Image: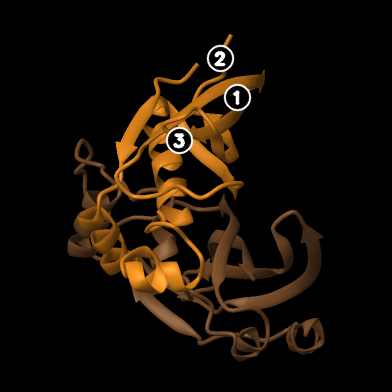
Chain colours: A orange, B brown
Amino acid sequence: MLPPLTETTTLRRLVEYAGASGDFYEMHYDLDFARSLGHPELAVHGLLKAAYLGRLVTEWLGGRGRLAVLEVSYRGMDFRDRAHTCRGRVVSTEGNRAEVELWGEDDTGRRTTLGRAEVIYDEETP
Amino acid sequence: MIEALQEAVGWTGPLREDVVERRHLDFYRRAVGDTASSSDSVVPPTFTACFLDEPPSLPAAASYGSGWLNGGDRFEYHAPLRAGDVLVSRPRFTGVVEKSGKAGTMALLTFETEFRRPDGELVVKHVGTRIRK
């Protein structure tokens, strides 16, 4: 298992992410707009959840190798001020390559984000 | 109507050229909660998301549904990326399918973006699934 990573995305964080990424879609910081689309609250950007999963992998990997593929699928929305926990586990290793299963859970344990990564170690692992 | 989206497959978005800037990297790291790494040489793996066309500017999208959702993202890493690097990219709308489920009818759109150095070397390929509903 990879060491888990928990992030609680505040409105400030959503605004910082909008500014840094250039994605100013209003559903992430304008509650009236979000509600007009039928959403109960401000949703966390999918790509911000992908960034948390990317951190999970690179912080676990450290300087031991590099990421070849990061793939994320969003199965449910996550809303601001709710803890989101990213988890992962190595499912297979072949030579210096490993396949990692990734997922993100909301604060009820529901897997809202599914993903996978392919990593390449600098040295072959026994 | 899904037809307008189907006819738009092959659309390409604006051509852009971006520099991986240190100040931008700092803003991005803070925005994704990365307070540990501050090394100039380490670019977070999802950083090229900053150079995507989000939400997509595809004009035909307005003809279907009322809003955007993100269905998924795939990043393929082909060459290292560092502060100071220049990336050239242009998003391409590569396909659309319509699906009906518990949450109603929606269109799943696929966009592909290759981030290349000015000399043509592929650095990152991104494939995004975006939903109109």
Residue A96, numbered circle: 1
Mark 2 = which residue?
A125
Mark 3 residue element: loop
Percent across and percent down for residue B65 are: 64, 78
Give me the C-alpha separation between circle 3 and circle 1.
33 Å
Chain letter of disc 2 in the image: A
Chain letter of disc 1 in the image: A
Identified at 36% across, 75% down, the residue is B18
Can I make out residue B84 in this image?
no
Can you say whether B34 is above or below A99 in the image? below
Instruction: Work out whether residue B102 or residue B72 is closer to the camera in this orientation and state it.
Output: B102
- For badge 3, the amino acid type reads Asp
Position of the C terminus of chain B, as image quadrant, is bottom right
Q: Earlier in the sequence, mark 3 or mark 1?
A: 1
Percent across and percent down for residue B12 are: 62, 85
Instruction: Work out whether residue A36 or residue B28 is closer to the camera in this orientation and state it.
Output: A36
Give me the C-alpha separation between circle 1 and circle 2.
6 Å
